[in-house]
Amino acid sequence: MTNQNVVVPDTKSGINLPMVRLSGSSIFPATAQKPPTAPGTGGNLEINGGGGGGARINSWIDSMRASSPTHMKSSSQSLSQQQQQITLPSAMDNFDQIMEASRGKQIVMFLDYDGTLSPIVDDPDRAFMSKKMRTTVRRLARCFPTAIVSGRCRDKVYKFVRLAELYYAGSHGMDIKGPEKGSKYTKGTEPVICQPASEFLPMIDEVFKELVAKTKLTPGAKVENNKFCVSVHFRCVEEKKWSEVAEAVKSVLKKYPKLRLSQGRKVLEIRPTIKWDKGKALEFLLESLGFANCTDVFPVYIGDDRTDEDAFKVLKEREQGFGILVSKVPKETNASYSLQEPTQVMDFLQRLVDWKKLAFQESRM
């Protein structure tokens, strides 16, 4: 098992598309065009197994508290104990070191959206990125292949970003589409498309409708249909009402054994039990760009959420590139560096663009 770091940040610092399989793909082998199903593991919450219903709900509530940025580690672990563990270095302070490691390699950028390119807000429908951030990401995509990897519905995150030259992986990587035009990194004439969970669409729609009905009497609860997954936001729900949200989710999901439950920052995520996540999406995109077995590729993944850990872990296991966690509070992580907030992410991306321009000018001298 890959060891995880614990972060103590540096204080200085709607339309169904067909699935296209790449020929010879190691992600989709010739004998199976869909990834195998797998039991809910890792950061997943148990739905039907062991213990009584009350005990299970209590464990969910504890997990919901632990996932909230406003709740620090258990009081049994003091801050000094946390700081004795590995301190994740700042990506800004170590920019030159990161660039030195990338020398002679193709940088490929992967960016989460909420909490990375836009601030976390109470209303998920108003998680707008700034004009300055959009300009920075546009400049970044001119220098490096760039993908947005989000738990959001792909169409929804595209409406937020509005940059046609990017790759977009929505629904935690279960809905991937490459740029149709405007990117010099596009391979072939057809845009890359991957939807490994398309058979679950009717089930996801059913669950969404049931959860909307079940949570309508809980003030602040918001259910979001992200096409291949359903998100139940409890950020605006009083903590004493969190059990109502958990009970509603449990009562619906017990009828759907092919779905699993995981969590992010004040959100419960319901998705298919297929072995697919943001890490698999990263691997698929690298393969579609022609970097599947290359030693001269340098992927950089920036994200703030628990679901981004799957991508961080893939990079650590590949021993290629780096994961960068966006966080101000201590967290267990497989990332190698940290940034504190979206404004610092923007500064890091702009510095990357400036570095690339300088390297290009020097190569022409």
Image (cartoon, rainbow, N blue to C red):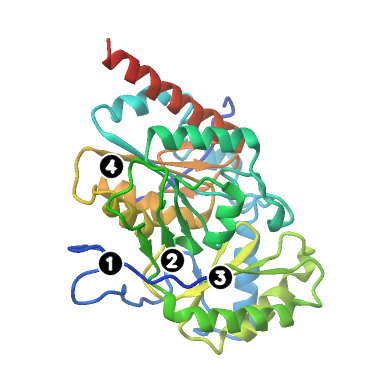
Q: Secondary structure at mark 3?
A: loop
> Which is nearer the N-term, disc 1 or disc 4?
1
Whole-angstrom CA distance, mark 2 to mark 4, is 23 Å
The residue pinned by badge 2 equals 174
Specify few, some or many for label 3: CA neighbours under 10 Å numbering under 14, 14-19, or 20 or more. few
Q: Secondary structure at mark 2?
A: loop
Does residue 219 lie above or below 53 as drawn?
A: above
**Residue 14 marker:** 3
Q: For the residues carrying marks 4 and 3, which lies nearer the camera in this image?
A: 3
Task: Name the one closer to the observer, 269 or 290.
Answer: 290
Task: Name the one closer to the observer, 314 or 358.
Answer: 358
The residue pinned by badge 1 equals 21
Q: For the residues carrying marks 2 and 4, which lies nearer the camera in this image?
A: 2
The residue pinned by badge 4 equals 320
Task: Tell me what residue is drawn at x 39 percent, y 43 percent.
Answer: 183
x and y, in percent, of residue 285 in the image: 34, 53
Left or right side of 251 for 351: left
